[in-house]
Image (spheres, helix red, strand yellow):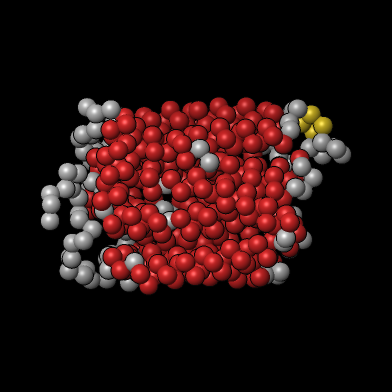
Amino acid sequence: MAHSPFPQSTPPEAKEPRRPVQRQSNFWVVSKYPDFRYLWIGNFFMVGAQWIQILTVGWLVLQLTGGNAFLTGTAVGIRTFPVLVIGPWAGVLADRIDRRKLVMVTQIYMAVAALVFAFMVLATDLDAEPVTGFLKWWHAFIYMGISGVAHSIVQPVRQAMVSNTVPIKDLGSALALNGMAHPSMRIAGPAIGGLLIATLGFNWNFFIEAAAYVTIVLVYIPMRLPYSERMTSRGTSLLASMREGLAYVVQEKTIRQLILMAVIPNLVFQPVVFVLPIFTTEVLGRGADAGGILAGAVGAGGIVAAVIVAGRGFIIGRGPATLAGLVGGCFFILLFSQSTWYLASMGFLAGLGFFQYLFRVGNNTLIQTIVPDALRGRVMSIYMLDNGLTPLATMGISFAIYIWSPAGAYTTLAGISLFLAVLQLMFFRRVRELD
């Protein structure tokens, strides 16, 4: 085999002896590594702010547009669109400059944007018929686009930072714990946001979002990255660094398969939350408070999976567990698309949350344990590139719902996705063999 020109980590094709089933809890990593603890705490605030924003903007646009399903889904989904352009360059920056400082500066930018939008909402009478004041529905599009720019930078950098706060032998445990923020705050964020909308209106949610970003900056001040490796791309041009990251992904077949597997969740799993206000009102006949609880059900299922993974490991191996998460998530979305009963819908969304967490953490852990740190930022930005397809998928789904029905649109999409997931389970042998 020809010698690889890239920095080496664990080769994906290496046939290591299968490890015994993990019995030790992973929670001790938080107390052992204080720098990871700062990152972990900050992650909860980041994800909480994200879900408060997603829920609130969705219901805000729904009210400003008089219930337009297409504009509602598109406004929320547009947040991930800048990933297509900015994401890869954010990965290049993550491999060239201090990752911690880059995240802190970006959080300040996000806090300012949230405050400006919060005052715009405060200056608008949303209870009037019709709505009067400064705020228009297209302002939400601009705000979500601005937030999307920051989101495109922060996401790959924060993922790359996990390996800089713990030694490689504890990376799997750290990633499992780091992933707990998403299901946990999927409960707290939408539930708090939905209750605030139902009781106080839209006026305070964006101030809470801004406060969360400021808190992240404060938490990161004492944090250091003691396990960072020397950044080898500083002496090359930005374009050459980009090419190096792309070449690595093209050369490593296992990485290619893992990245390809992430396409279905971003095209199918994620838009479910973005169009949830439409399902809640049109199919279930409920309001914002019920919608927040439904979004929280996704997080509840994820927490169950998080407790199992963090406490006992993946048990069956990370490769098979990741594939199971993909197939299981598609199956529960198919069930959700057929439901007209509120409690059943809540249960199906909890099932989605369980398998989505299993997939996300398993897929992320496999990639990060294979990729060398010198290329980590670029590879993670490529891995997250398909997040940019989420708004396009949301727009398409929203339009299909608009001209057809929520159940019809999602039944078709979930059926096709389940078929593709089963094909990957059958033919991605390299992933199946990963432990």
Find residue 132 and report its image quarter: top right
Find residue 357 and report its image quarter: bottom left
Residue 213 in view: no
Above or below, 343 relative to 196: below
Residue 30 in view: yes
Of residue 289 and residue 429, the one placed in the foreground of this image is 429
Find residue 376 and report its image quarter: top left
Q: Residue at x 39, y 38 (%)?
A: 88
For this orientation, the residue located farthest to the right is 129
State the quadrant of the C terminus.
bottom left
Above or below, 321 relative to 156: below
Total residue callouts: 0
State the quadrant of the N terminus.
bottom left
306 horizontally vs 399: left or right: left
Of residue 227 and residue 389, the one placed in the foreground of this image is 389
Q: Residue at x 51, y 69 (%)?
A: 418
Q: Position of residue 47 (x, y in %)?
A: 50, 45
221 horizontally vs 196: left or right: left
Q: Position of residue 393 (x, y in %)?
A: 57, 52
Above or below, 69 relative to 227: below
Q: Position of residue 257 (x, y in %)?
A: 34, 59
Of residue 267 and residue 97, the one placed in the foreground of this image is 267
276 horizontally vs 181: left or right: right
Q: Position of residue 24 (x, y in %)?
A: 28, 64
Q: Residue at x 30, y 50 (%)?
A: 250
Of residue 240 and residue 204, the one placed in the foreground of this image is 240
